[in-house]
Image (cartoon, grey):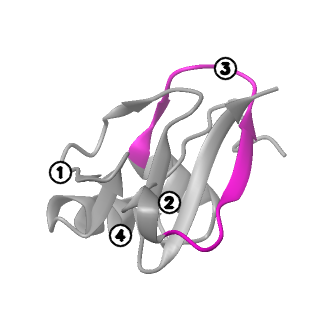
Amino acid sequence: MSIGADGHGQMIERNVMAMDHIRIVKITREPVELYKVLKFENLAASGGEAKHFIADGMVTVNGKIETRKRNKLYSGDVIGFNGHFIQIETE
């Protein structure tokens, strides 16, 4: 599945060791901004809400807290948020 009309995709990761289920998100172009993954994967109601979650330190990328809203994500990155984990892959 591609994310967004612009072909951007992202992934989320919290703690790789504790992940029970990782959803794979296919993207057509790298990089993709972190907040867009949360928005397009319906983990946030809007881009603004996604940016708020990130700024508040509620999101991890590859197991580390990420507070940069426009952090660029690439294939293999894992995003973690609120018990959800998303891994980014290119098509």
Q: Which residue is mark 3?
A: 29
Which of marks 1 and 2 precedes in the sequence?
Answer: 2
Q: Which residues are magenta?
A: 19-34
Instruction: Residue type at mark 2: give it.
Output: Leu
Q: Nearer the viewer, mark 1 or mark 4?
A: 1
Please give the name of the residue rendered at 62% of the width and 32% of the height, measured from the top-left corner: 8
Which residue is tagged 4? 49
Q: Quadrant of residue 71?
A: top left
Q: Earlier in the sequence, mark 2 or mark 3?
A: 3
* Residue to which mark 2 is pinned: 38
Local packing at callout 1 (Cα closer than 10 Å; few below 14, some 14-19, many 20+) is some
Name the residue beneath numbered marker 1. Answer: 67
Q: Nearer the viewer, mark 4 or mark 2?
A: 2
Q: Secondary structure at mark 2?
A: helix
Asked whether disc 2 touches disc 1, contact meaning CB atoms under 8 Å apart, the reply is no
Q: Are marks 1 and 4 in contact (CB under 8 Å)?
A: no
Between disc 4 and disc 3, whose residue precedes?
Answer: 3
